[in-house]
Amino acid sequence: MAGVFSPGRAKIDAKTLRTDRWWLQPTITVAVLVSFIIYATFRAFEAKYYFAEPLISPFYSPCLSTDCVDGSSLIGQPFGHVVLFGLAISPALFILIFPLGFRMTCYYYRKAYYRSFWQSPPACAVAEPHKSYSGETKFPLIIQNSHRWFFYAGLVFNVLLTVDAVLAFRDGEGHWGHMSIGTVVLLLNATFLWLYSLSCHTCRHTVGGRLRNFSKHPFRYKAWTWVSKLNEKHQNFAWISLLWVAFTDFFVRLVATGAVTNVYFF
């Protein structure tokens, strides 16, 4: 046995001696993540209401399937109409694996869902129910080691979503020089995703890692200090970007269905 159950530890029957509401944070985490998963799954399989010129949902961008609606494909349509088990594959499923993989393997999110879903541990000074610990050395947790590669893929998607935000400075007929509520929504979405990505622990290591000293690398040192400062707010950016990407998709859906009008400022 390991952890609080090891022979050398004090024998305390109570799960914890804490008297505060330590369970509140993991409960909220479960509620938010489950809600996001349900909504994102619904939208990924809905396969419609994701494009309203010039706005496109981040769940479907870049739209890479021939099933994509006209005007929604930014970099082409390399995938044809794919049917699996009698069901057509939604265009969203070709791309969501990458942002999903980036967040699932993220150091902060691992801490969040290890504590909330697996209670490993649920909070500081609270005993976890597991009697052994194998780390991230076995399947499926060994996949966590691919975080760096999902980080690189995430940067590519950030660039594409930034392009989507720039393209939103057009009106419904494609004329440039206009700005709408949708433009602001997409701009904020791209901004929050960049802040989440650049504050990532892997980004910090990529920028300043594998150096014997910083004195010979002043630019990388400056970049490392800047990323380190962002890293202090990584948890905040993780939640803000997650909620805003869902809101962005929801807003685009409302516009695409005609439920709301994408009001233009000019």
Image (cartoon, rainbow, N blue to C red):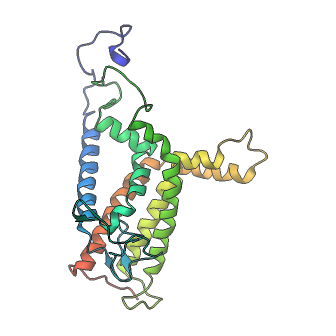
Is residue 184 shown above or below 138? below
The residue located at (27%, 12%) in the rendering is 12
In this view, the residue in front, 78 or 228, is 78
Measuring from the top left, give residue 227's x and y in whole percent: 58, 51
Is residue 250 shown above or below 255? above
For residue 264, which quarter of the picture? bottom left
Measuring from the top left, give residue 50's x and y in whole percent: 30, 73
Residue positioned most to the right? 216
What quarter of the picture does the N terminus occupy? top left
For residue 105, which quarter of the picture? top left
In this view, the residue in front, 15 or 143, is 143
Is residue 103 shown above or below 54? above
Q: Is residue 38 visible?
A: yes
The residue located at (42%, 47%) in the rendering is 235
The residue located at (53%, 55%) in the rendering is 152
For residue 263, which quarter of the picture? bottom left
In this view, the residue in front, 108 or 263, is 108
Measuring from the top left, give residue 251's x and y in whole percent: 29, 72
In this view, the residue in front, 135 or 161, is 135
Q: Determine whether, in the image, residue 3 is placed left or right of residue 259.
A: right
The residue located at (36%, 56%) in the rendering is 242
Q: Is residue 232 visible?
A: no
Is residue 233 shown above or below 264? above
Q: Determine whether, in the image, residue 195 is placed left or right of residue 25.
A: right
What quarter of the picture does the C terminus occupy? bottom left
